[in-house]
């Protein structure tokens, strides 16, 4: 028959194992949610960076700097982040304007942004 001290040690070991399993599961869930949230934040920042580049392009067309009658590929440098030393890290946004010839004489303006690096 086991003594009281042996039962206490076995009981303590069971609690330690259960606590370790629960804490490991919680750590795994929190880290995966953090990675998902970081990816979503990059997507949102990329969307607004591309939108700001489109506004910059339309402003250049309005000021007459860019000719809207020809197909163009432009790259804009958008402030993205602040590094450890306090400097601004820029990312590039590619703008493509394709002049469509048709009945309504409109064009297609698209912006692409790589938010994965």
Image: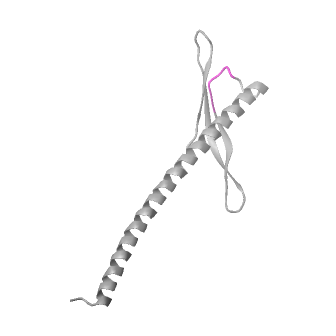
Q: Nearer the viewer, residue 64 or 36?
A: 36
Farthest residue, direction top: 103
72 magenta-colored: yes
Q: Going by the image, does 96 lie left or right of 68?
A: left
Q: Please tell me in which quadrant of the rendered image residue 28 appears.
A: bottom left
Quadrant of the rendering where the N terminus is positioned: bottom left
77 magenta-colored: no
20 up-or-down from 47: above or below: below
x and y, in percent, of residue 68 in the image:
68, 22
The answer to whether one can see residue 117 in this image is no
x and y, in percent, of residue 88 in the image:
71, 53
Residue depicted at 63% across the width and 43% down the height: 92
18 up-or-down from 40: above or below: below
Colour mapping used in the image:
one colour
x and y, in percent, of residue 60 in the image:
74, 30
The answer to whether one can see residue 18 in this image is yes
16 up-or-down from 24: above or below: below
Farthest residue, direction right: 63
Residue depicted at 46% across the width and 56% down the height: 32
Count of numbered badges drawn on the protein:
0
- Which region of the structure is painted magenta? 68-73
Residue depicted at 59% across the width and 43% down the height: 44
Q: Nearer the viewer, residue 30 or 87?
A: 30
Residue depicted at 29% across the width and 88% down the height: 6
Q: Please tell me in which quadrant of the rendered image residue 50 appears.
A: top right
Q: Main secondary structure of the magenta part?
A: loop
Q: Please tell me in which quadrant of the rendered image residue 57 appears.
A: top right
């Amino acid at each position: 028959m086991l003594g009281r001290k042996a039962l206490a040690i076995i009981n303590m070991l069971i609690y330690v194992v259960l606590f370790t399993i629960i804490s490991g599961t919680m750590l795994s869930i929190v880290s995966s949610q953090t990675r998902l949230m970081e990816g979503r934040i990059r997507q949102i920042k990329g969307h607004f960076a591309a939108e700001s580049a489109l506004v910059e392009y339309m402003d250049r067309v309005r000021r007459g700097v860019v000719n809207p009658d020809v197909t163009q590929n432009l790259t804009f440098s958008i402030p993205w982040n602040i590094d450890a030393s306090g400097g601004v890290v820029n990312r590039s946004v590619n703008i493509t304007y394709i002049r469509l010839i048709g009945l309504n004489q409109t064009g297609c303006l698209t912006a692409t942004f790589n938010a994965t690096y």
